[in-house]
């Protein structure tokens, strides 16, 4: 490498701008609690990272009287622990005190600025760990934040293009997984809540040898042709109805382990918390922390195929995950669960356990699980009450297996694994490109070949 190349890299590595020089900063503000709702009244409201995904947040709460509004393309930066997490507003939305809006002064720098801010996340973690920002970042902290900033606009655009291409591939995989999930939810409601195939047969809209949307002719004989009375109301003939505890049994409580091994014979394992379960259920690989456990703790809490984990405490208690053996391939160590989770083991077939899980998720989305939450400041899930009270309908095994095939967990895992491979490459290139340790020309072909 010539001396000019070395000096150019050094110059690009040391050139910096403060955030206030390249972006407008709008700190979040939380409206009155009475303006929040979950029925879609007003704008999506994001208070912090709880609703963040890889790049775009998922709306769960809405606000009818927003105080601070982000527009599509704005960068949403977490200013409360964990500080420094970045998402992008893909629609008009409201933000609370846990976030700030970062709006680039030059719109063409938006994608580069997004990556430059992501590069600072470890720095925020270090500052948090030292206690310097006391769990939140102020406007002054953000304004003075130094960012690597190549002087050439072309250089900034080129870096953003390379990293953005990888990001877009990750986002595509996430959206494909999300589409699969939406299709499965639609199918679950049609088959196991509305009993649409049975009603279509009863009303003569679906006849043997004919097809309907979502109901191919070869499925005709799998569904009964009449509804019968049950304690839940009318259900398809031959299907079972019962309390959830008839089909699932509570398992052993979780363990949290230790951050470092200080006990003889302790071994490392990945420990799922409630939020981790939620990420896996949505087709994302969570950043599951490795902790230290005694071997017996791991043996007793090894997840078996078709076990259901439910987030047992906290604001989102009731969110859940159906464990599949294929998930084990995503982690390099044994996976167990923390004491924030409740485990339910199947008393039915794995396919029927999948249907049970969707009943739980359907009840969570509808708000029906709220009846099983205790406490206010820190809610907990009453698992005994849930198992003893929630009525569910289970189909015949052939129909349950058909639904399991449509869920296609193997394909979902393949999407997640591919996304992780791309993310590893992106995370490797991110500091090298932005800090000038790697030239754009050296990475173009690698990205184009993916």
Image (cartoon, helix red, strand yellow):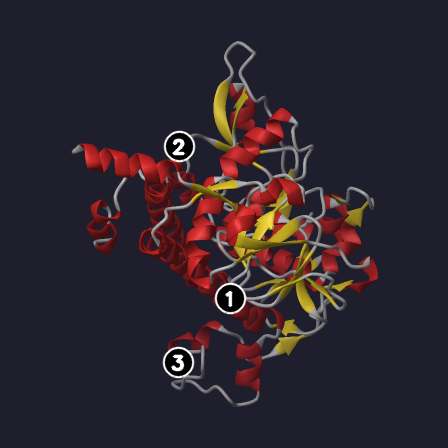
Q: Is residue 158 above or below residue 221?
A: above
- Residue visible at 52% across and 90% down in the picture: 204
Residue situated in front as seen by the camera: 324 or 436: 436
Which residue is disc 3 drawn over?
A: 217
**Disc 3 on helix, strand or loop?**
helix
Q: From the viewer's perspective, is the residue at label 3 or at label 1 nearer?
A: 1
- Residue visible at 26% across and 48% down in the picture: 440
| Image position, residue 390 (x, y; %) | 72, 56
Q: Are marks 3 and 1 in contact (CB under 8 Å)?
A: no
Q: From the viewer's perspective, is the residue at label 3 or at label 2 nearer?
A: 2
Residue 302, numbered label:
none
Q: Which residue is situated farthest in the bottom direction here?
A: 204
Which residue is disc 1 drawn over?
A: 182
Residue situated in front as seen by the camera: 424 or 150: 150
**Disc 1 on helix, strand or loop?**
helix
Which residue is disc 2 drawn over?
A: 332
């Amino acid at each position: 490498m010539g001396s000019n190349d070395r000096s150019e890299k050094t110059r690009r590595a040391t050139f910096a701008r403060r955030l206030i020089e390249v972006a407008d900063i709008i700190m979040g503000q939380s409206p009155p609690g009475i303006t929040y709702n979950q029925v879609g009244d007003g704008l999506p409201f994001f208070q912090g990272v709880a609703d963040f995904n890889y790049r775009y947040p998922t709306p769960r709460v809405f606000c009818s009287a927003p105080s601070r509004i982000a527009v599509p393309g704005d960068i949403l930066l977490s200013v409360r622990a964990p500080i420094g997490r970045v998402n992008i507003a893909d629609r008009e939305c409201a933000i609370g005190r846990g976030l700030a809006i970062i709006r680039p002064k030059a719109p063409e720098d938006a994608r580069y600025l997004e990556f430059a801010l992501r590069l600072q996340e470890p720095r925020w973690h270090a500052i948090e760990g030292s206690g310097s920002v006391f769990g939140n970042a102020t406007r002054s902290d953000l304004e003075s934040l130094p960012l690597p900033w190549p002087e050439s606009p072309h250089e900034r655009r080129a870096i953003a293009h390379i990293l953005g291409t990888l990001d877009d591939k990750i986002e595509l995989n996430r959206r494909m997984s999300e589409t699969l999930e939406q299709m499965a939810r639609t199918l679950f409601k049609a088959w196991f809540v509305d009993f649409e195939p049975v009603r279509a047969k009863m009303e003569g809209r679906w006849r043997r040898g004919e097809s309907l949307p979502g109901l191919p002719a070869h499925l005709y004989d799998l569904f009964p042709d009449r509804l019968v009375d049950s304690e839940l109301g009318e259900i398809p003939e031959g299907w079972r109805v019962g309390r959830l505890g008839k089909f699932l049994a509570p398992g052993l409580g979780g363990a949290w382990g230790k951050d470092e091994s200080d006990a003889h014979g302790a071994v490392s394992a990945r420990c799922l918390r409630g939020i981790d379960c939620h990420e896996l259920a949505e087709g994302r690989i969570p950043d599951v922390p490795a902790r230290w456990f005694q071997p017996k703790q791991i043996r007793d809490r090894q997840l078996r195929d078709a076990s259901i984990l439910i987030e047992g405490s906290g604001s989102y208690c009731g969110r859940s995950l159906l464990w599949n053996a294929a998930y084990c391939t995503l982690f390099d160590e044994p996976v167990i669960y923390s004491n924030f989770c409740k485990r339910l083991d199947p008393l039915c077939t794995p396919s029927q356990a999948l249907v049970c899980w969707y009943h739980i998720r359907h009840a969570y989305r509808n708000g029906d699980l709220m009846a099983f939450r205790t406490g206010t400041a820190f809610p907990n899930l009453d698992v005994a009450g849930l198992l003893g009270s929630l009525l569910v309908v289970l189909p015949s095994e052939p129909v349950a297996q058909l639904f399991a095939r449509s869920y296609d967990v193997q394909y979902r895992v393949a999407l997640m694994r591919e996304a992780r491979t791309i993310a590893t490459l992106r995370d490797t290139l991110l500091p090298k490109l932005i800090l000038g340790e790697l030239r754009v020309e050296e990475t173009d072909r690698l990205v184009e070949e993916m």
